[in-house]
Amino acid sequence: MFPWLLLALSICAHPGTAVSPTVPPRHMDSVLDILDALESPARGGSPGAAAALVRRLGVCSTPGCRAVLGGPLGTPERPPALTPGQWQLLTELLHHDPATPELGAVLAPDGSTVALGPLLAGIEAGLRSGGFERPLPTLDPPADPLLAVTITEALGTSFLLAQGSDHNATALGPGGCWDDVENPQNYTLRGPPSPVPDPVAIGAMDGAVLGARLARGPLPVTELLRGYYGTGNGSEVGRPPSSYRRRNFGALAGQGRLEKEVAAVLELLRTLSPTSELLRDVGTQGVAAVAHRAAREFSERYVECPAIMPRCLWGARPYRGTPDPLQPPLGSVFLHHTLEPSRPCQTFSACAHAMREMQRFHQDTRGWDDIGYSFVVGSDGYLYEGRGWHWVGAHTKGYNTQGFGVGIVGDFTATLPDPDTLALVRDELLPCAVRFGHIRPDFILRGHRQLGHTDCPGNALFEEIQSWPGFQRTPVARGLRMEVKALPATPEPPALLKNYKWRAAPVLGGQQAAIPKGAPKGTGTRGGQEGTRPPLQQYLHSEDRRRRHGGSGARAALGAQDGAGDSSSQFGVIGKFTDYPFKSCVHIVNKDIGEPGLPMKPCRTLW
């Protein structure tokens, strides 16, 4: 045995040798246990003890926060109610270098990462506003004390520093990853840090929302936090209130109010040391410009746009091989339902499990490089990163390079996702994808069934999205646009149908489609050139028959049937034409997806 190992074993076994305490995981449950011990009379605690202790530990380390809540009153000793491990965790979370705010973060049950400092500062400000302990001071110049200790001081300072930087410094973000979501100990940012990384922004929003609640009347802090976040990794049946933080913070402090309060707190910092030096050469107009930019960018990133759970948080496997890059902005969004799992997921735990199962199926059974979708939408209020914004997916065969594939967890054949989930995609994801340059302003939204033989995204969801901005009602084959000039009241069999006009033209991504062989001649244009093309093979049949032969094998493919690959000979179903008043029943097929044995049948069903 190695000598150093013998020495280590002898030291560990020696009576009286100090042993490092067992530090609980950096999870909100650990914090709740600590606060519960501090405030529980049965364990030697008392109401209000937690707020006083965290202030003494340095929850307020900035001039504005100290002007509101006061500074530390001396270094405290470990309360008897806490174990050595709990005490070590609490001091590490609250008494860390201000330049590394991510060290003060914990993983919450809803999957978000929360900085403890602004959260607890907001709770104390709310308690004191509600008459618990001594009242808050009146600030001069006036500023909202709750917003000052949670978000506006950090936000204004961050944008002020970024404005004066010669290195084009970032003022918001980034997010990060935990080493283990089941036993989180280390959190690492995924890019250059700013004074307001994602955990600080989330903790600030939660602190403001909960502080406003406490200002209306006191509640036990542990009870408040447990009801807000839930417990565990979101193992409850329903969606926790914390997942609505963006909406609730936006109602509390919309962009206009946030801008006003950032300007107010900057004027307050002008009177305090050492921030007065930072504002010495910044006039009133400069403060207003900083406040306007800070409020706008914060609202866009953290209020108006949905939170995206990165792959590292849901436990993704590595990508197999080398992903192909996309070329944004893209022109299309393709909507899917996952079909399996058939039930919507409403918690982080359930949604993360669904993501892992879908990735396992796509990689191990389908043989794809990764989960097929670009993003997946849970009913827990979050988007889950699949292939993401930058890499080609495997979601809509023939169109993967031309758009993003978005899947919603559940089977939406007969029922719809809940209204909040629909709004997340329609009112948040799509506008924000345009705003940040991922898709074009004139993007086209389609359901998967319009571009392949599948019932995806389910009848109920497909009917719903037809009223959404960007939806293109007419299904088209890639590279082929067909115009029917006129049809008789009772359509003849295809062999006799001659009165039509077709045109092959770029439809998606500027790609042309191959034309199947063997049908009546038609005139058309290609690339602006007139000419005679080989006739199209046509089958005319009823919508019901088309749906029966279209297949519903997507159930085995978790909603991503025909997701991988690219084929210029893949054709869809031509839908309702401008000059065709009857029910859509023209079906362009070829040997790849055609139905050569299908009897030709005229379509007489009116719309």
Image (spheres, rainbow, N blue to C red):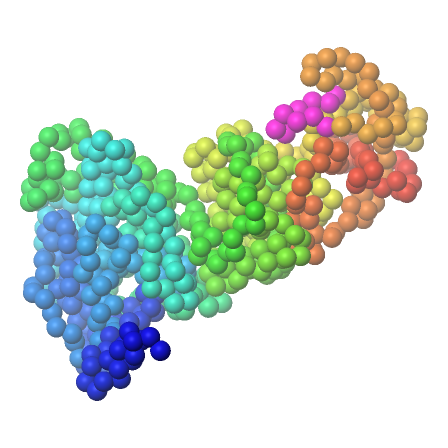
Q: Is residue 372 above or below residue 80?
A: above
Q: Position of residue 312 (x, y in %)?
A: 44, 55
- Total labels: the figure holds 0
Q: Which residues are magenta?
A: 503-513
Relative side of 141 to 551, left or right = left
Image point (69%, 45%), residue name: 562
Who is closer to the viewer here, 573 or 513? 513
Q: Position of residue 302 (x, y in %)?
A: 36, 45
Q: Is residue 505 magenta?
A: yes
Relative side of 329 to 472, left or right = left
Relative side of 174 to 363, left or right = left
Quadrant showing the C terminus: top right
| Image-quadrant location for residue 501 | top right
Image point (67%, 53%), residue name: 366
Who is closer to the viewer here, 179 or 149? 179
Magenta-colored segment: predominant secondary structure:
loop
Quadrant showing the N terminus: bottom left
Q: Position of residue 79 (x, y in %)?
A: 16, 76
Question: Is residue 36 visible in the rendered structure shown here?
Answer: no
Who is closer to the viewer here, 255 or 386? 386
Image point (30%, 79%), residue name: 6
Q: Position of residue 550 (x, y in %)?
A: 78, 45
| Image-quadrant location for residue 448 | top right
